């Protein structure tokens, strides 16, 4: 009796039921990490198998590799399986590989499977969706196929949990490795393979073949610069051309598989009428296709704006209570202030997003899981393409109206690097829900409320205009970026339209859980850090003046019934003399042409935490403080005068300010997510600069024309 | 006479003969679009592009520009 560790890798085509199997094997006993060096999520799970025969317990550590159609490393996602399966030093290098295949789509699945078998790693092939295959009239001679491939095959219906125990058992079997290659790569490049095998520690002909083709592109731990040079020599000497070799391999492999299929599978491909085709007739219909899509969007946004409001209010309330409890409980002082106005404020600012993120991903995952999402890409691709976007950009852009953070996380499905970058770069221009309070405040300040044609609300009209302008800016910026951005690779839109299926709730819940966790911990760290910095800037000031004000304020506040008005006045004077106030003044020359004064400058600085902070900052600056929030700010702002005695918030200033908020990148959560998704600070910095420039120019034009 | 896959009308079945673009060829072959394979053009997207085809038992969406590089023979 002993504990034996076993490392397993799970691999398969997209839509083969890979994540369902992963969840079925591990339950919630899984975590998400990153593969070293890249921002590809690495799902690792654990489970144990008791072997009745030898009494040992096997502790299995399973890595879910990104879905792929082959081992050719074309995208970052596809590099991972290649690295993990060919690099013995990789921490996930497996003792066993589970290949999961859609039994109704056997030919394409066997392509990937045969590549892995040829790497000479022990493979268990799971034939998933056997029920559908039987329904389709497919007869697969499993023993014969097992013999031909030299591996263990387990038929399964993973979503019904059938076959799971058999898969576990198959992992413990020690099978003899097949000696012959399914596709003998040594026939394609005999000399190259011979020399590589002589000099490098590769396990099989096929591993040598792949190494010859990909050593320049994909780093492997056992290949250094000197060895790369050697590989360069070998491949050049024998005229090894990767594209030619790959094409040759693909052809040969499919040829072999076709022969195999003929002997092991009865009933070949048919083009019969199917349910999927009937649904497609409807959802990709010239008119109904778009109507259905819009209706689905309508439902999603109703949920995100209305339903999410309840948990968000609850979170807001809880944090307000928590803050006041902490502030009462701890002695007055810096720690108290830091905890309440720095840490808790920052934490609240993160957690408030969770309901919207969870809801948005609930819908997105359902749409992905059922197969509908690829149809959206299919009908929208033509529309998006002139702007450097593609069909898959539609959902992130639309989600951006709720919040750019989950929207940017949703761009992962875009395979083309350039189109994905453009989508990430322009998504924050869509008017997100954090802009809503800003627009609401400013519109009621500058736009008189009246009805056009008796029923169109003037304020609502301007609000719609703000949303439209965000969309137009996003599309236009995308077009400009398409012209500028150098693409590393050509753009492709080769996309599988999977058969429709019912959503698998367990997968969906786990995905939501993962996304929320990633947001909470990865983006959260940065948000908290910046919140603390902002707290410091607005609660500390240069020189003695701030400290004196602080002392005066503390003394006044300690009185039994402090005069609220005076307190509020001191509060605003404190802000004026804090570092943030000082920054507002420093900003003044730059924002004066936009019609803003230093007070608005402070709001611009603090809004960097999140746009909705604008309203709070405004209320602090105009020393409102107190119970009834919204109305008084409005009144105070309306009463605010410039030096010459005219009202500060004219139509020109209000519009200029709204345009600034529409375009400027004032959201550290988004910047943090962009950093995470693109893997470098370069992109968030570019985004910050270009959106800032856009905001400044738009505000400048609006103010100068209208003032 | 070989035609381009992009010229085949929806509902028709054709056979892949060869490719005129190396890069697209690799991508499509990996997805099972192998010379000799039967392909049914399923539909054209509402705005005229991309198209959907059935190949090797599943549906694949490709842009017209990509379909132009696939030469096919009709049955």
Image (tube, rainbow, N blue to C red):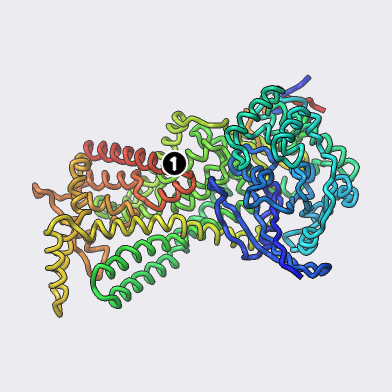
Query: x%, y% of residue A428?
Result: 41, 46
Identify the residue under disc 1.
A425
Q: Residue at x 45, y 47 (%)?
A: A674
Q: Chain of mark 1?
A: A
The outermost residue toward the bottom is: A560
Quadrant of the rendering where the N terminus of chain A is positioned: bottom right
The outermost residue toward the top is: B1
Residue A69 sits in quarter = top right
Residue A579 visible in image = yes
From what the image shows, is residue A629 above or below residue A589?
A: below
Quadrant of the rendering where the C terminus of chain A is positioned: top left
Query: x%, y% of residue B7?
Result: 70, 26
Query: x%, y% of residue A236?
Result: 67, 23
Residue A527 sits in quarter = bottom left
**Viewer-proximal residue among A363 and A515:** A515
| A488 relative position to A338: left or right | right
Q: Residue at x 63, y 42 (%)?
A: A78
| A430 relative position to A543: left or right | right
CA neighbours of label 1 inside 10 A, class few (<14), some (14 to 19), many (20+): many
From what the image shows, is residue A313 above or below residue A599?
A: below
| A248 relative position to A422: left or right | right
Q: Residue at x 76, y 31 (%)?
A: A194
**Viewer-proximal residue among A35 and A588:** A35
Residue A282 visible in image = no
Query: x%, y% of residue B48?
Result: 61, 32
């Amino acid at each position: 009796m002993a504990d034996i560790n076993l490392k397993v890798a799970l691999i398969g085509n997209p839509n083969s039921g890979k994540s369902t199997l992963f969840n079925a094997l591990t339950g919630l006993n899984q975590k998400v990490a990153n593969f070293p060096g890249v921002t590809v999520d690495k799902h690792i799970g654990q489970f144990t198998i008791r072997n009745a025969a030898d009494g040992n317990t096997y502790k299995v550590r399973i890595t879910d590799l990104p879905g792929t159609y082959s081992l050719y490393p074309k995208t970052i996602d596809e590099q991972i399986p290649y690295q993990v399966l060919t690099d013995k030093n990789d921490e996930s290098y497996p003792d066993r590989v589970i290949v999961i295949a859609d039994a109704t789509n056997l030919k394409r699945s066997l392509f990937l499977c045969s590549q892995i078998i040829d790497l000479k790693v022990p493979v268990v092939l799971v034939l998933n969706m056997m029920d559908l295959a039987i329904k389709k009239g497919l007869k697969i001679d499993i023993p014969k196929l097992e013999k031909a491939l030299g591996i263990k095959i387990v038929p399964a219906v993973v979503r019904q949990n059938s076959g799971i125990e058999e898969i576990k058992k198959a992992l413990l079997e020690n099978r003899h490795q097949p000696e012959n290659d399914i596709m003998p790569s040594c026939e394609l490049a005999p000399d190259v393979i011979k020399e590589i095998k002589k000099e490098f520690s590769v396990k099989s002909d096929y591993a040598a073949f792949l190494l010859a083709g990909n050593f320049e592109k994909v780093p492997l731990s056992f290949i250094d610069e000197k060895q790369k040079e050697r590989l360069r020599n070998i491949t050049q000497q024998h005229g090894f051309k990767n594209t030619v070799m790959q094409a040759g391999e693909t052809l040969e492999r499919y040829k072999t598989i076709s022969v195999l299929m003929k002997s092991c599978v009865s009933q070949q491909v048919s083009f019969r009428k199917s349910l999927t085709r009937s649904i497609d007739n409807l959802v990709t219909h010239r008119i109904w296709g778009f109507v259905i899509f819009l209706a689905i969007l309508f439902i999603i946004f109703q949920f995100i704006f209305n339903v999410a409001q309840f948990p968000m209010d609850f979170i807001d309330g809880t944090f307000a209570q928590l803050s006041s409890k902490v502030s009462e409980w701890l002695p007055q002082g810096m720690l108290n202030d830091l905890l309440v106005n720095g840490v808790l404020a920052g934490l609240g600012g993160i957690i408030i997003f969770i309901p919207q993120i969870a809801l948005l991903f609930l819908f997105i995952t359902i749409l992905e899981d059922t197969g509908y999402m690829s149809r959206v890409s299919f009908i929208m691709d033509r529309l998006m393409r002139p702007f450097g976007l593609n069909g898959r950009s539609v959902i992130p852009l639309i989600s951006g109206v709720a919040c750019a953070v989950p929207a940017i996380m949703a761009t992962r499905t875009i395979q083309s690097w350039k189109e994905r970058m453009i989508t990430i770069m322009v998504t924050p221009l869509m008017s997100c829900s954090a802009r809503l309070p800003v627009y609401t405040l400013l519109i009621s300040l500058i736009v008189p409320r009246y009805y056009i044609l008796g029923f169109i609300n003037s304020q609502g009209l301007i609000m719609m205009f703000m949303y439209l302008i965000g969309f137009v800016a996003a599309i236009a910026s995308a077009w400009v970026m398409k012209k500028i951005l150098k693409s590393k690779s050509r753009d492709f839109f080769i996309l599988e339209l999977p058969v429709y299926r019912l959503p698998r709730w367990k997968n969906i819940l786990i995905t939501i859980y993962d996304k929320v966790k990633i947001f909470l911990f990865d983006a959260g760290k940065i948000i908290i850090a910046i919140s603390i910095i902002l707290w410091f800037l607005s609660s500390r000031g240069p020189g003695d003046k701030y400290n004196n004000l602080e002392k005066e304020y503390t003394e006044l506040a300690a009185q039994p019934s402090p005069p609220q008005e005076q307190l509020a006045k001191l509060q605003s004077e404190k802000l004026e003399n804090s570092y943030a106030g000082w920054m507002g003044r420093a900003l003044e020359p730059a924002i004066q042409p936009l019609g803003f004064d230093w007070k608005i400058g402070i709001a611009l600085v603090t809004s960097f935490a999140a746009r909705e902070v604008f309203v709070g900052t405004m209320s602090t600056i105009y020393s409102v403080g107190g119970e009834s929030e919204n109305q008084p700010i409005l009144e105070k702002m309306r009463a605010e005068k410039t030096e010459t005695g005219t009202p500060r918030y004219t139509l020109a200033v209000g519009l200029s300010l709204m345009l600034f908020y529409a375009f400027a990148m004032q959201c550290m959560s988004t910047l943090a997510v962009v950093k995470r998704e693109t893997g470098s600070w370069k992109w968030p910095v570019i985004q910050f600069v270009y959106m800032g420039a856009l905001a400044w120019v738009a505000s400048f034009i609006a103010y100068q024309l209208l003032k | 006479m070989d035609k381009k896959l992009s010229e085949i009308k929806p509902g028709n079945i054709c056979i892949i003969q060869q490719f005129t673009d190396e890069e697209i060829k690799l991508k499509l072959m990996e997805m099972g679009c192998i010379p000799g394979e039967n392909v049914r053009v399923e539909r054209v997207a509402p705005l005229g592009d991309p198209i959907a085809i059935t190949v090797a038992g599943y549906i694949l969406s490709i842009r017209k520009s990509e379909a132009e590089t696939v030469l096919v023979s009709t049955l």
